[in-house]
Amino acid sequence: MPFFRLLLLLPTIFFMSIHSSYAQSITSRYPFTYYNCTSNSTFSPNTDSAYPSQLKTLLDWLSSNGTRKDGFYKTKVASNNPADTAYGLFLCQQGIDIESCQQCMIEAAKLTPTLCNFAKEAIIWHRVCFLRYSNRNFFTTVETSPKLFFMNNKDYEGQVGHFNNMLWDMMNDLRNESAHASKKWAIKSINITENQTLYGLAWCLPYLSTDDCSWCLSYAIAEIPTSCCRGKTGGRVFYPSCSVRYELFPFFGTSTWEPPPSPSSHSPPPSTPAGSAATFNLH
Ligand SMILES: *[C@@H]1O[C@H](CO)[C@@H](O)[C@H](O)[C@H]1NC(C)=O
Ligand SMILES: *[C@@H]1O[C@H](CO)[C@@H](O)[C@H](O)[C@H]1NC(C)=O
Ligand SMILES: *[C@@H]1O[C@H](CO)[C@@H](O)[C@H](O)[C@H]1NC(C)=O
Ligand SMILES: *[C@@H]1O[C@H](CO)[C@@H](O)[C@H](O)[C@H]1NC(C)=O
Ligand SMILES: *[C@@H]1O[C@H](CO)[C@@H](O)[C@H](O)[C@H]1NC(C)=O
Ligand SMILES: *[C@@H]1O[C@H](CO)[C@@H](O)[C@H](O)[C@H]1NC(C)=O
């Protein structure tokens, strides 16, 4: 079932564009994987520092705990020298099955240290999950950088002012709902005209407080008309601590939101392998 839903999302790929000055993509095998080695501080592999081995253990733990049902895990591997403690977390897209989550995590945990080599800190958005690690305790902070934007290239045709007002109201409702939700995410849909429905999603890292989540989402929502996707029919803003998305079609992979039949679901699947297609189905 989830595989089928991913295919349904395929047609969206052809009019999506990505713009970000804060993350780079891997062009070869994983064209839709984005990462940033966020710290210029590196470790040298041949010193006494315990960090490389703590980091290795951390990545092992994150990979093996990808089976957790809630698709989220955060942990630290402590060291006698606090500067060598490794902190890390992963989060899978809401509504995906445990197998896809775990597979994504295993790939991300392998990929990141090779991409970021000796950096002490890194973040990666890979297919349906994201992974982050550092030697500083980032669990206590709300972070809005590095950031990543995707926009739907299609302009909204119709009453743009009305659309923007409805979008703004919906995103702010989603902000409030996610911030108060125990899992810190929410989805919503509203009818903007008699034949157009707007769909939205907002999420925060599950351990954020209501205030921190609300604060983070306020910044993410403010990117929509400024940096991300002004006047467009869809867009996504990713921060390390929270994220928002809106579209004129249903895009959630959850069983609570079955996509209605649409003309695009009858098109033959493009030649893109499902594995790489899934990379667009980020949170
Ligand atoms: C990584 O993110 C930082 C901000 O946290 C940004 O200054 C830097 O340019 C980014 N690097 C790349 C390669 O995008
Ligand atoms: C890393 O160094 C580059 C070049 O000196 C700088 O532009 C960038 O902002 C630095 N990034 C961080 C996260 O300090
Ligand atoms: C999960 O992480 C914990 C530490 O937080 C670790 O002890 C355990 O081995 C990891 N793997 C599994 C499958 O629980
Ligand atoms: C925010 O959400 C809470 C809980 O869902 C609800 O009780 C409250 O009325 C909402 N506030 C606003 C301003 O929508
Ligand atoms: C939105 O439109 C759909 C189909 O046109 C309809 O079934 C639904 O009741 C409408 N929802 C609201 C809240 O008006
Ligand atoms: C919505 O309905 C109106 C008239 O009822 C029609 O002109 C318009 O093309 C429809 N828009 C879409 C996107 O189907």
Image (cartoon, rainbow, N blue to C red):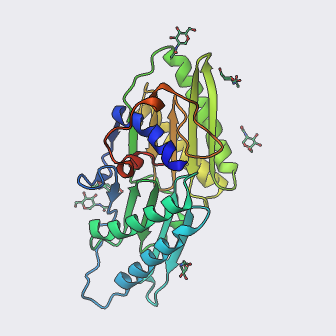
- Specify the quadrant of the image occupied by residue 176: top right
**Residue 135, position as x, y percentages in the image:** 41, 75
Q: Is residue 108 above or below residue 169?
A: below
Q: For the point 58% across and 51% down, which residue is it?
A: 95
Q: For the point 33% across and 87% down, which residue is it?
A: 49
Q: Is residue 231 above or below residue 47?
A: above
Left or right of residue 76: residue 56: left
Label count reads 0
- Specify the quadrant of the image occupied by residue 45: bottom left
The reply to whether residue 78 is in sight is yes
Left or right of residue 163: residue 156: left
Q: For the point 43% across and 24% down, which residue is it?
A: 231
**Residue 161, position as x, y percentages in the image:** 52, 18
Q: Nearer the viewer, residue 202 or 33?
A: 33
- Specify the quadrant of the image occupied by residue 167: top right
The reply to whether residue 227 is in sight is no
Q: Nearer the viewer, residue 221 or 193?
A: 193
Q: For the point 44% across and 61% down, which residue is it?
A: 104
Q: Is residue 57 above or below residue 28?
A: below
Left or right of residue 248: residue 115: left
Q: Quadrant of ligand 5?
A: top right
Left or right of residue 102: residue 95: right
**Residue 155, position as x, y percentages in the image:** 40, 22
**Residue 110, position as x, y percentages in the image:** 35, 70
